[in-house]
Image (cartoon, helix red, strand yellow):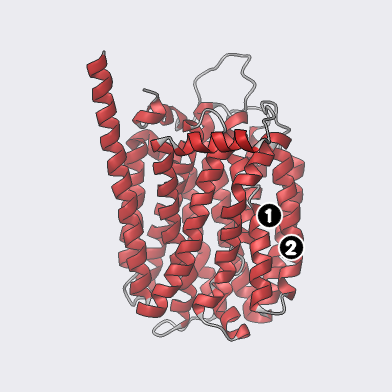
Amino acid sequence: MSPADTGASTIVAASTSVPAPLPASDSRLTPGGPGYRRMSFALFLAGVATFALLYSTQALLPLISSGFGVSASAASWTVAAATGGLALFVLPMSALSERFGRRAVMTASLVVAVSLGVLVPFAPSLGALVALRFLQGAALAGLPASATAYLAEEVRPKALVTAIGLFVAGNSVGGMSGRVITGWVAQEWGWRAAVAVIGVIAVGCAVAFRLLLPAPKHFTPGSLRPRVLARTVRDHLANPLLCRLYAIGALFMTVFGGVYTVIGYRLTEAPFSLPQGIIGSIFLVYLVGTVSASTAGRLVGRLGRRGALYLAGGTTAAGLLVSLADSLPLVLLGLVLITAGFFAGHAVASSAVSKTATTGRAQASALYQSAYYIGSSTGSTVGAMAFHAGGWAGTVGVGVLAVLGVVTITVFGSRAARVERRGLVAAA
């Protein structure tokens, strides 16, 4: 049985800061080697642009609600449409990356997404805004799966978890900066100016990304034939470990999407009654996610993959429960725990997908990303509905159920691995 099937042995090695020497003929990137820093920074910037654009309206939902005269659940579609568009198009875009190359698809995705970002501030109605956000999410679909596939091909295996963790850290910085900046800009000039500023920042990230990312050296073009793609997808969905990882990613993101879609509404109400700029600054807690994602390799090295997932789930659940208090410091502590647990769990699960799939890596990553963003759309919509029906406690209830799902799946995976090990021992 491969290490990817049993748990942490392969990923333990990935957590070491200095990889073991590999043959001189291995030209893949490694920490400290030529090109690794440029690659890491380029993909970090891609992650910043992706999350900043994807969630640019999330901190602005109360203003969008009042501007268009709509409810919280209606305004939440500006987030759900973007993540839903990404979820629907990530698999087709991954197929294009198999044929035309990871760097080419990532560059095209950013160009289209930032171009649409120029139009978003001028949306005349909520329907137009939702449509533009859907198209923007569909354009961004070329980034996540292509990025993880690029890393799996261009980075030495023992550095893969760390490299993917840095990309995920870029996601957290993008999500944080987008929300903080939009909060303060919107307080002075309104939500349209705020999303315009995010569009300008994303343009800068896109240009730097294209200039910095090293040309791929280990990419082999694949086929665009639908039959080949369907067979690859079917094989991935027939892999129990991959399916468990997809479900875990979706459930973690259900928690995160729900919490951060609704938190702005909660903080504008009594007993907090915070202004928009302060609410935007609350998202500085994303820096915690930057740290937890970038250290996921070491966490897996100490606890194993499933141990790290248990810790991430427990931390997220603790944060949800703490956030129920009507005390701003405790709400902030809850958000810190939720953010740390989510980003750690996401980094562990996404890197495990890349290590488990030995063929069709872009499709394997695309399926994970699709599940992940379906979870985001579900969390945004259901979390807002639960808030409308039962207040913050309703949103927390949805999150706790999702965390229980993560724990249940991980327990099932542990038992399945033990059964398989016993079967191998008996066969020997």
In the figure, is residue 412 to the left or right of 259?
Answer: left
Quarter occupied by residue 321: bottom left
Give the labeled residue for mark 1: 139
In the figure, is residue 105 to the left or right of 323?
Answer: right
The residue shown at (29%, 27%) is 420
In the rendered image, the vertical position of residue 86 relative to residue 94, given as above or below: below
**Towards the viewer: 215 or 285:** 215
Amino acid on which disc 2 is placed: Leu
Q: Return the mark for residue 82.
A: none
Relative image position of residue 215 (x, y in whole percent): 73, 33
The residue shown at (56%, 44%) is 366
> Is the N terminus in the top left, top right, bottom left or bottom right quadrant?
top left
Give the labeled residue for mark 2: 116
Quarter occupied by residue 301: top left
In the rendered image, the vertical position of residue 236 relative to residue 123, given as above or below: above
In the figure, is residue 207 to the left or right of 326?
Answer: right
Relative image position of residue 118 (x, y in whole percent): 76, 66
**Towards the viewer: 241 or 122:** 241
Per the model, the C-alpha gap separating discs 2 and 1 is 9 Å
The residue shown at (72%, 75%) is 123
Relative image position of residue 69 (x, y in whole percent): 58, 86
**Towards the viewer: 24 or 4:** 4
Amino acid on which disc 1 is placed: Ala
From this viewpoint, which residue is outermost toward the front?
A: 227
The residue shown at (23%, 24%) is 422
Task: Judge the density around disc 2: few (<14), some (14-19), many (≥20) Cα neighbours within 10 Å.
Answer: some
Quarter occupied by residue 196: bottom right
In the rendered image, the vertical position of residue 56 relative to residue 357, given as above or below: below
Relative image position of residue 281 (x, y in whole percent): 53, 69
In the rendered image, the vertical position of residue 17 relative to residue 50, given as above or below: above
> Is the C terminus in the top left, top right, bottom left or bottom right quadrant?
top left
